[in-house]
Image (tube, rainbow, N blue to C red):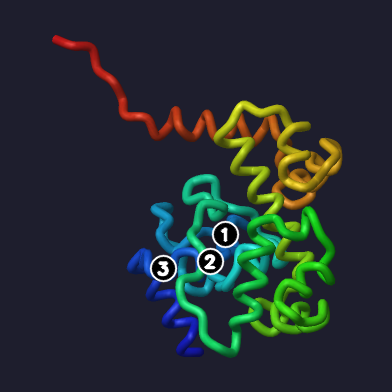
């Protein structure tokens, strides 16, 4: 068995916080993906698929876990020289840079061409900058729907979708959820997790 897979699975078994944000696990039977620190039942190794970025997991067809919430995962901590451009570009894309400018304009910040960033992110993550940006925007929208009372239209504008219908369409396509369903699911989850109260005696 591939030693990298064994190492990744060990991180899941140990709920290793040191790789949180740098490793995600897709669970085939459920179709969701989680952070390594997730407290849901640990899946069998044969049911796992490992990814280095949330966008890669979503590209493979997995939806984010409502419990551990991948959108809250921290960013990558360490950067080596070979992947520096990809990681720097990733940071800017995750901050929403492609919502306000083109990839060519972003590339100019680093003194490179757009194709250089495409090649770097494809080599490092197996994803194009636009794929990363779309996933990040959708995760950010999911977070805002979960944590705020902002209207769907305002969230669509804030997260780069511009149009409410476009955001709703992407939520249904990627997560099979509407904004209303997502907010209802989160409320129900918190109700189930809330400690049971007993009358005072």
Mark 2 falls on what kind of element?
Answer: strand
Residues under numbered marks 2 and 3 in contact, where contact means CB atoms less than 8 Å apart: yes
Mark 1 falls on what kind of element?
Answer: strand
Q: In the image, 190: left or right of 160? A: left
**Nearest the camera: 166 or 33?**
166
* Label placed on residue 12: 3
Task: Residue at 71%, 40% (x, y): give it.
Answer: 177
Crowd rating for badge 3 (residues with CA inside 10 Å; few <14, some 14–19, many 20+): many
Establish if 56 lies above or below 6.
above
Residues under numbered marks 1 and 2 in contact, where contact means CB atoms less than 8 Å apart: yes
Q: In the image, 25: left or right of 14? A: right
**Place of residue 182 in the rendered image (x, y in percent of width and height, measured from the top left):** 64, 36
Task: Residue at 48%, 46% (x, y): give it.
Answer: 67
Residue at the limit of the structure toward the left, as seen here: 201
Cα distance in 3D space between marks 2 and 3: 8 Å
Upstream in the sequence, badge 1 or badge 2? 2
Task: Residue at 63%, 36% (x, y): give it.
Answer: 145
Task: Residue at 72%, 41% (x, y): give it.
Answer: 158
Residue that badge 1 annotates: 33
Residue that badge 2 annotates: 25
Cα distance in 3D space between marks 1 and 3: 12 Å
């Amino acid at each position: 068995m591939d030693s990298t897979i064994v190492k990744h699975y060990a991180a899941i078994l140990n709920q290793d916080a040191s790789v949180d944000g740098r490793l995600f696990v897709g669970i085939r039977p459920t179709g969701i993906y989680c952070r390594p620190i997730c407290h849901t039942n640990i899946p069998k190794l044969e049911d796992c698929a490992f990814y280095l970025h949330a966008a890669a997991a979503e590209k493979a067809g997995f939806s984010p876990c409502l419990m551990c919430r991948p959108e809250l995962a921290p960013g990558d901590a360490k950067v080596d020289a070979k992947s520096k451009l990809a990681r720097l570009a990733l940071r800017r894309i995750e901050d929403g840079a492609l919502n306000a400018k083109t990839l060519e304009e972003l590339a100019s910040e680093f003194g490179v061409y757009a194709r250089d960033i495409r090649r770097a992110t494809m080599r490092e993550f197996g994803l194009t900058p636009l794929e990363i940006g779309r996933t990040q925007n959708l995760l950010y929208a999911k977070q805002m729907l979960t944590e705020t009372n902002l209207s769907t239209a305002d969230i669509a504008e804030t997260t780069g979708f511009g149009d409410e219908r476009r955001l709703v369409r992407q939520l249904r396509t990627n997560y099979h959820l509407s904004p209303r369903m997502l907010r209802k699911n989160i409320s129900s989850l918190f109700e189930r997790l809330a400690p049971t109260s007993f009358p005072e005696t």
